[in-house]
Image (cartoon, helix red, strand yellow):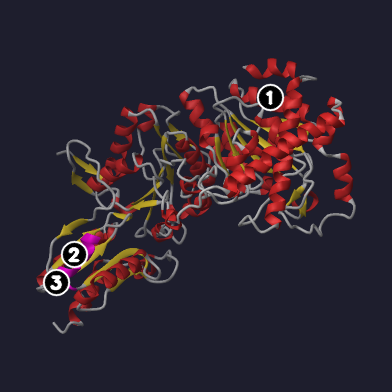
Amino acid sequence: MARLEEREQVQGSERLKDFLREMLLIRRFEEKVEERFRAGELPGFLHVAIGQEGVAVGVCRALEDGDVIASTHRAHGHTIAKGTPPNEVMAELYGKVEGCSHGYGGSMHLYDLERGNLGANAVVGGGLPAIVGAALAFKMRGEPRVAVAFFGDGATNIGTFHESLNLAQLWNVPAVFVLENNWWAESTPNSQHSPITDFTQRAVAYGMHSIKVGGQEIEPVYDAAAEAIDHARRGDGPVLLVVDTYRLVGHYVGDPQVYRPKGELQELRETQDPITKLRERLGVTDEEFEQLDADVTREVDESVEFAKNGTDPKPEDALKNVYA
Amino acid sequence: MPELTYREAVRDTLATAMRQDSDVFIMGEDIAEMGGSMGVTHGLVDEFGPERVRNTPISEMAIVGAGIGAAMQGMRPVVEIMYEDFLTLSTEQIVNQAAKHRYMSGGQLKVPLTIRTQGGAGWSPGAQHAQQLEAWFVHIPGLKVVFPSTPTDVRGMLWSAIYDDNPVIVFEHRLLYPVKEDVPEKLEPIPFGEARVVREGEDVTVIATGPMVHRSLEAAEEAEKNGVSVEVIDPRSLQPLDENTIVESLKKTNRAVVTHEAVTRMGFGAEVASVIQYQAFDWLDAPIERVGAKFAPLAFAPVMEQFLIPGPEDVLEGIYRTVGRNGD
C-alpha cells in the first residue's frame, strides 16, 4: 500500500516536478502530433487531450505495477503516463512495426500489455466491461491488483457504462472508473447530453462509492486517484472517480469548434491550463521551465525521428494476428 | 460408453473443465440455482459454488464484456447468452472488442472466451426467442463459430472452445438438448475445422448444420427408398470451415444441397455454395440447392412457424431437385 504514504510525500516534493515534466511531455507530444497530422504525415484521424494531462498523469502515477488500464479514443496521454515510451506511441501513429500496437492499431487503439494498457477503445464506453472482467479475474485469483477504465462524460449515457458499474458494484471487484468530464461529448455540450451535471449521482444508483475532484490541479487528482485505487485494492469495492476537466482543443485535430461559445476556449486556456497551474504552484522559474521544456521537446522530436525511421509493415502482415 | 443427452454433454464438459482448471468459470443469467433457462448448468453451482458459477444480472453487454476482461487476464470464462436473439445486445462487445483485441494490439492480447448460446424454432417461441444468427458471426474475422449437432460433438467441441485462445461462439439448439447418444468414456477434444461425414452416399451431398443434420438424415433415409444415395456432412465448425471435406464429397456426388434452419437468404449456406462452385465448378451436375427458413421473422402460430422453417421434407425436395434437374 505505497500510495497513501507516498501521498504524504508528494506535496512540494521533487515528485511534483516529475509530474510537471510528464504533463509537459504529453503536451508537447500532442502538439507535435497535431503539427505532423496537419503536415499530412499521419494517417487516420486524431484526438488529442490537451488540457486533460493532469488526469492521465495524476491517475496513472497513483497506480502500481500490475495494475491495468483501458483507455479511450483520446489515449496518447494515458498511454504515455502508463509507461509506454513516446517513441513507441509515435511510431504507432506513423503506422510502424515499432509502434506499441505494431501498426495494427493507430491512435485510437494504443495497447501495451506489458505495461498494463489493455487498449484504447474507439467505441465510446467500449472498454468498461472488460475492466470489470479484469478486476473480476484479480479478485478470483486473490491478486491485489486494480483495473482502471478511463472514459468521458459522453460515455455516461451508453449502456456499457451502466451495466459495468452495476456489475462491478454487485460483485465488489477492484475497479476504478475514471470519468474525465470535459463537458463535451464530441460537439455536444453536457447540457444537451446529460440531465445531470454532478456525475457522482450516477454512482448513487449503484450504491457505488464516488469521489469528485477538479482535474486542472494535479495534486488533488493524484490524491483522489490514490484514495480510489486504495479503496478498490483493499477490497472495499469499485469507485467512480469523477474528474472535472477541460478539453482545451477540439474534438479532433482540425475541428473548427463552431459549437464552442466565442471566447470560451481562449479564456479556458488562460485560466485552466493544468501545466500553468502546476508551474505556478511550484514556483518554477522561467529558466527552469525553459530547460524542462527543451528536454521534453527534444524527447518528442526524437520520437518523430524514431517513428519516421521505423519499419513499415509488409502489406500482407495485415493477415496476421487475426487469430491467436 | 456412457449415454448422454446433448444437455448432459454440455454440462459434463463444463464440469470436467472446472474440476481440473481453476481458470475456468461460467457466468450468465439464471445459470446457478435454476441451471439456466434450458437446465444445462443444473447442479454445477452445488459443486463449484457461486464464485465460479456466477448468476449475472440481465446485462448482456457486461456479461460478454466481463468475460473478455477476465479472458484477457488469462482466465477461461464460459459465458452463457440465454437466447441467441440476445446476442444482439452484446454484439458490440463480441464484434468490436472480443474479435479485435488481438488484432488491434498487434498480437499482444489473447481473448480465450467461450460464448455459449442457444436458439432454434419448433416450439412456437415467436420472433425473438428462436432466431438462428450464426451467419452474422462467421462474417467477423477474429471469431470462431461452431454449431455442434450431437452430444459427442458438443462435448468435444465445447472443450476445444474453452481451450482455444480465441473467442469462440458455440451455438447450441434448443431441440437438440434431449438428443441422446453413446459418447466416448473419456472426453475427447474435437478440433475445429474438421467436418464430420455423418452418412456416406453416392448421388447427392447434403451439407447440414445443427438440427438440419438430423432432419437431413431422415430425408436421406427416405431418398434411399427411392434409389437416391445421399451423403450427409456436418461442418460442425463454421469458422474455421473444413472446405476440403465438402468439396471432396461434391466431387464424388456431383450434386449438393446446403441446409440450415436460419433464413436461406444471405445465410451460411450461401458461403458453402460459393465454396463449392468455385472449387468444384466442373464437377457440378446441377445447381446447388439451398434449404433454409423462408424470409420472414418466426411466426407464433405453430402452422405458420412450421411453414417457415425447413423440415426433412424440404431437404428431400432439395435432394430430388438436384437429381431431377440432371434428368435422372
Label 2 neighbour load within 10 Å: few <14, some 14-19, many 20+: some
Residue placed under numbered mark 3 in the picture: B203
Label 3 neighbour load within 10 Å: few <14, some 14-19, many 20+: many
- CA gap, disc 1 and disc 2: 63 Å
| Type of amino acid at the residue the image marks with label 1 | Ala
Same chain for the residues at labels 1 and 2, yes or no? no
Residue at far bottom of view: B327
Q: Is residue B44 magenta?
A: no
Query: Do we see residue B298 in this rendering?
Result: yes
| Type of amino acid at the residue the image marks with label 3 | Asp
Q: Chain of mark 2?
A: B
Residue sitting at x 73%, y 24%: A223
Q: Quadrant of residue A253?
A: bottom right
For the N terminus of chain B, the image quarter is: top left
* The residue stretch that appears in magenta: B244-254
Q: Position of residue A23 (x, y in %)?
A: 73, 35
Residue B248 is labelled as 2
Residue placed under numbered mark 1 in the picture: A226
**Taking B243 as reference, is A190 above or below it?**
above
Same chain for the residues at labels 3 and 1, yes or no? no
